[in-house]
Image: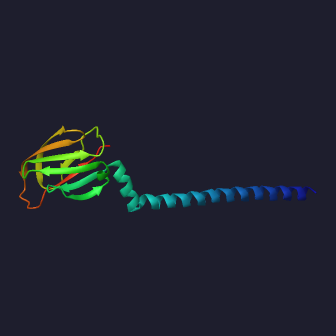
Amino acid sequence: MAGRTTSHILVAVLEVVAILLGVFFGFYALDSYIDNKIEKKVESADYIRRVASNVRPYVIFNTKGTILTDAGGMQYIENIRVEGEQDLHIVVTPKLLLAHAPLLNCIDEYKYTQNVVRGSKYDWEYNLHLYMSTGGNEIPRFRLEIIP
């Protein structure tokens, strides 16, 4: 009778261990599956583009006022007007009030001194004076980063 009781206890213990291992490996498989799905989603170009447009939205434009790249910035901007040849006057008209002036940087081989002031209504006005150029013939491009 004692052998039978011991074998029942051993079987019960093995069943509990098997159930615990099954639950553990089930959770492990589920965790791996979820991690894999999240990793694929986060690494996708579409997701990165959507996040970047909300975190650091920007617009790239040239001195002709042509929008070359919109990485979410145009959801905040109504219009960008560029006047002048070497010394530039750029007026950025937002769709809504921007408490801080968008960051404006030339991304080509031109160097400008910059003065930014609040214009009429929601406008931000940038007065740029060219002080250095390496002689490139291309049209200067600017990156305007919105600070939401």
Q: In the rendering, at what x and y percent does residue 19 appear?
A: 72, 57
Tell which residue pokes out farthest to the front in this image. 121
Number of dots carrying numbers:
0
Q: Residue furthest right?
A: 1
Indicate the quadrant containing the C terminus: top left, top right, bottom left or bottom right. top left
Horizontal and vertical percent position of residue 121:
23, 38
Query: 49 and 119: which one is in front?
Result: 119
Q: Residue at x 51, y 58 (%)?
A: 35
Residue at x 27%, y 49% (from the top left corner): 77
Q: Quadrant of the N terminus?
A: bottom right
Please state if 40 lies on the left or on the right of 52 as rendered.
right
Q: Is residue 96 left or right of residue 116?
A: right
Left or right: residue 6 versus residue 72 is right
The location of residue 103, given as percent across then percent down, is 23, 45
Residues 15 and 81: in front is: 81
Specify the color scheme: rainbow
Residue appearing at x 62%, y 56% in the figure:
27
In this view of the protein, which residue sits in the foreground, 97 or 132?
A: 97
Q: Quadrant of residue 94?
A: top left
Q: Percent position (x, y) of residue 74?
A: 29, 52
Residue found 20% across the figure and 55% down from its top = 61
**Between 41 and 18, which is closer to the camera in this rendering?**
41
